[in-house]
Amino acid sequence: MRVIRETLHNMLSLLNDILDITAIESGRLTLKPRRVRVAQYLEDILHLNGMIAVRKRIDLRDEIAPNLGDGYFDPDRIEQVFNNLLSNAFTFSHEGTTVTLRARRLDGNLVFSVVDEGQGIPVDELGSVFGAFQKASTRPTAGEQSTGLGLSICKRIVELHGGAIHVESEPGRGSTFTFFIPG
């Protein structure tokens, strides 16, 4: 039953990713922005993802600047970005490492980073990580599954918000995914 449940979960996840990428590519994905108290929003995201970190024995930390105030964005879609970035950080990091979520304001933008101490991404693969169905050569540390769609979806969601996303990585030292959206 467990194997069937995991297989169904993986298939549903893939189907949802394909539906999201199709909606984005066809211009049918509409954002539902609203005013969001950023610090509380991030605390909720950290709480939900904390359970995954505990299961994997990874220390989840935050570096949230004081006085982030309110932001205006689609909280469900930006949560999708955070969940994907944090999930990837956990997937490609070993037990006993740290994943950090950072948040600050800079030049009128909200700037967020997910920093891990994982395997890192080879330099020659950095340019393609945001492409659909692209997977780096690094492998999950506990046999997790990946569709190769998550980062592509993240990039498009961030861009729909008028922002941008990029990655810095060094093999053996981890990765930092940073995105900004107008605040």
Image (cartoon, grey):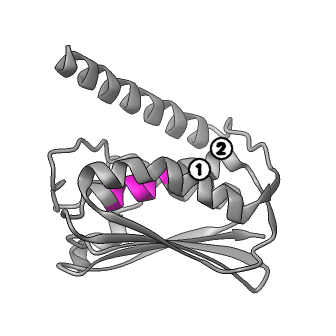
Where is mark 2, residue-wise? Answer: 76
Residue 2: within the magenta?
no
Judged from the image, the secondary structure of the residue bearing numbered disc 1 is: helix
| The one of 65 and 141 positioned closer to us in this rendering | 65
Packing grade of label 1 (10 A; few <14, some 14-19, many >=20) is: some
86 magenta-colored: yes
Q: CA distance from mark 1 to mark 2?
A: 5 Å
| Residue reaching furthest to the bottom | 107
Q: Is residue 99 above or below residue 1?
A: below
Label pair 1/2, CB-CB below 8 angstroms: yes
- Compared to residue 9, the image places residue 51 above or below, namely below
> What residue appears at the point 81 percent right and 70 percent down from the top-left corner?
69
Numbered tag placed on residue 113 in the rendering: none
User: In the image, residue 171 lies at what x, y percent?
Assistant: 19, 78
> Which amino acid type is marked by label 2?
Asp
Circle 1 is placed at which residue position?
A: 79
Q: Is residue 136 visible?
A: yes
Q: Is residue 81 left or right of residue 135?
A: right
* Quadrant in which the C terminus appears: bottom right
Measured as percent of width and height from the top left, residue 144 is found at 21, 44
Estimate the x, y position of residue 97 in percent, counting from the top left: 25, 71
In the displayed structure, does residue 93 sit left or right of residue 71?
left
